[in-house]
Amino acid sequence: MKKNLLLSSFVFAGSLSVLAQSGTNSPYSQYGLGVLSEQSQGFNRGMNGLALGLRYNNQVNVQNPASYSAMDSLTMIFDVGLSGQITNFKENGRKLNANNADFEYAVGAFRLLPNVGIGFGLIPFTSVGYNYSNKPDTKLSSVSFTETHYGSGGLHQAFVGVGWSFLKGFSAGANLSYLWGSYDRSISIASTDGNVNTEVKNYSASVTSYKVDFGLQWQHRMSKDGVLTVGATYGVGHNLHADAEYKTSSTNSQTGVVTEPPALKVDNALSIPHTFGFGLSWKHADRLTVGADYTLQKWGSLDYPEINSTTGDYVLKNGLLNDRSKITVGCEWVPNPLSMRFLNRVNYRIGASVATPYIKVNGQDGPKEYSVSAGFGIPVNKGRSYFNLSGQWVHASSSGLITENTFRINVGITFNERWFMKWKVE
């Protein structure tokens, strides 16, 4: 047990550094707080992130902390995952591919007391990562300009949670997260004319705050083989007390002298929204599980910093973000979990989602997302642990904007160790 504790400590400590890497190449991550993370784990990524009504005793369901109360009393569960993806960008007949890989999460759970489970781990919240150039039209026909857009960063969560089954069939839980990270976005404008200065605009912010999420679940056996689970979640929206900064600089093309006016700053510029979720699942004979989730994030009521085009001031402005809705459906099937045949014990998964955008691009709604996934949960270590493999396709598009098609491979390993089993020697 001591060796396992030491190993898990190294896993989570190492995760802190790799989580700092960006998990996206999307130019849409230059808006808002970046591209939102799915925050799902290996077992439900094959179901496209279905989670709110799922309740397992051998998997860590971070998205509804009420599920922690279902943890098996004999085991300690660790789950780590990574992903690799290729994205095709298309605009005005032009196409471009970009690849990247990312460490996704490291989570764990165990039962603390009868009917009380504990969850903990590291998961991403948003990602910022892009690098592209364009040549805007100008009235000076003899001079051409190149705008280079670059961004990196994102927000991350280190959390601990508790789930309590306080009444037969009813469970409640909460996750308390330390939320940290930063973003750095820049626009560099250079000219082919040696008499025109190079201009750089830089937008940055650093966050150290908290995040609180609550969950409820009700589970009831409807028939001999049928179990219904209903789940609900609420994420507390609040100001992150993070300041946003805007700096400009101009480099003289003749002398190389750099001019930097005083930076503009907006106090308490960033916030996270109130988030509501509802989900349900139906399990038949411990072999077939089907479910659906709905989530709503109230981004539309939040202000966000922007340069006032008239006065040049850096100010908070309303109407730059939208409320985001997401609907997910998913299914998991195990032919026969007690069979001696290996393929009969594999968990087969499939799911689909549709999500509205939370960002606006030049005043219009950002891309709507459609996604589908399929995957496997392969039992190892006599069925206690699982190797989870899934593939996901995400299509994001909006009229007149860049179209993204992403194919992602997700790999997760769930370690289920019997740390708390008592051995009897006669």
Image (tube, grey):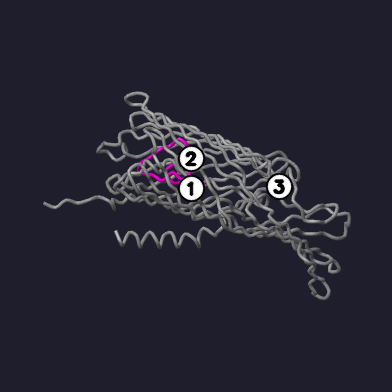
Residue named by callout 3: 303
Q: CA distance from mark 1 to mark 2?
A: 9 Å
> Is disc 1 in contact with disc 2, using a CB cutoff of under 8 Å?
yes
Residue 73 pos. (x, y %) = 30, 45
User: In the rendered view, would you say 386 is above or below 145?
Assistant: above
Residue named by callout 1: 175
Foreground: 349 or 139?
349
Specify start and end residues of the magenta stretch as a single range: 39-63
Q: CA distance from mark 1 to mark 3?
A: 26 Å
Q: Quadrant of residue 401?
A: top right
- In this rendering, position of residue 21 left or right of residue 167: right
Secondary structure under tag 1 reads strand
User: In the rendered view, would you say 398 is above or below 417?
Assistant: above
Name the amino acid type tagged 2: Gly
Residue at 35%, 63% (x, y): give it. 6
Mark 1, residues whose alpha carbon is within 10 Å: few (<14), some, or many (≥20)? many
Residue 81 pos. (x, y %) = 44, 52
User: In the rendered view, would you say 260 is above or below 396?
Assistant: below
Looking at the image, which residue sits at the far bottom? 255
Mark 3, residues whose alpha carbon is within 10 Å: few (<14), some, or many (≥20)? some
Residue named by callout 2: 215
Looking at the image, which residue sits at the far top? 223
- In this rendering, position of residue 68 left or right of residue 407: left
Foreground: 254 or 77?
77
